[in-house]
Image (cartoon, rainbow, N blue to C red):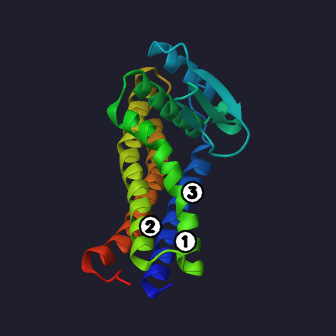
Amino acid sequence: MDFGFILIMIISAGISLLAQSYVKKMFTKYSQVGAIGGNTGAQVAAKILQTAGIFDVSIREQQGMLGDHYDPTKKCLVLSSENYHGRSLAAIGVAAHECGHAIQHQQAYAPLSMRMAAVGVTTFANQALSYLFFFGMFTGFLSTYVGVAAMAACWGVIMLFNLVTLPVEFDASRRAKIVLSQLGFTATPGENVAVAKVLNAAALTYVAAFLTSLLYFLYFLLPLLTGRSDD
């Protein structure tokens, strides 16, 4: 490994840790602040889905912190126990955000459709990276050019997937903020600001993932463009 690769590893790890730390800070802070409406995350999610005319999406509880997600293949909205039963501003914010994804699915939101279509190839690219690293670094099975080109291709796929993810996540948060206010789940400007802080912090993790994948993609792409990857 050269200095450039080590530097990228350090930078990407730092970006990721900072983003995760900020998310946990905001979530911990506002998970201790109860929403005036007193609804649980599950109740908020059920009402939002009902209002949107979505009746084929189940709401399930899952153990663990910050494992909340919407599964479009199973039409299932999964909330961590803390958010499923929680009545905090953080809990209802996260629940509304995941509902935003369900609404995107219902409306065939283009970036979400693109993201869903790219899951398979992105999973393959992620798995291939470890094999490419092993064969390229330790066995010499692949030529330098082929190894670098394959790594660039894999990171390019991951980078594009992360890029498409950004509008999906930001749009879901935008929808969440609007619907929480419209349905009266957030009753004051202060509550709206608090929910926005939680959701904006969560969005930073996706920005961090994109920046990390972009750095690695450029690291492997530039030698191909400058001819420095030749045997």
Q: Quadrant of residue 157?
A: bottom left
Out of 49 and 230, give the one closest to the viewer: 230
Inter-mark Cα distance, 3 to 2:
11 Å
Which label belongs to residue 127?
3
Inter-mark Cα distance, 3 to 1:
11 Å
Mark 2 neighbour class, 10 Å CA radius: few under 14, some 14 to 19, many 20 or more: many
Q: Amino acid at mark 1?
A: Phe
Instruction: Write the residue at 54% across / 54% down.
Output: 23
Which label belongs to residue 133?
1
* Residue tagged 2: 151
Mark 1 neighbour class, 10 Å CA radius: few under 14, some 14 to 19, many 20 or more: some
Query: Relative to 77, is 140 above or below?
Result: below
Task: Provide the secondary structure element on which disc 2 rests.
Answer: helix
Task: Point out the tag, 3 or 2, that comes first from the N-terminus.
Answer: 3
Residue 174 visible in the shown view: no
Position of residue 167 in the picture relative to residue 73 (left or right):
left
Q: Amino acid at mark 2?
A: Met
Position of residue 11 in the picture relative to residue 219 (left or right):
right
Q: Are marks 2 and 1 in contact (CB under 8 Å)?
A: yes
Query: Relative to 188, is 198 above or below?
Result: below
Query: Relative to 14, is 56 above or below?
Result: above
Out of 146 and 167, give the one closest to the viewer: 146
Looking at the rendered image, the quarter that the C terminus falls into is: bottom left
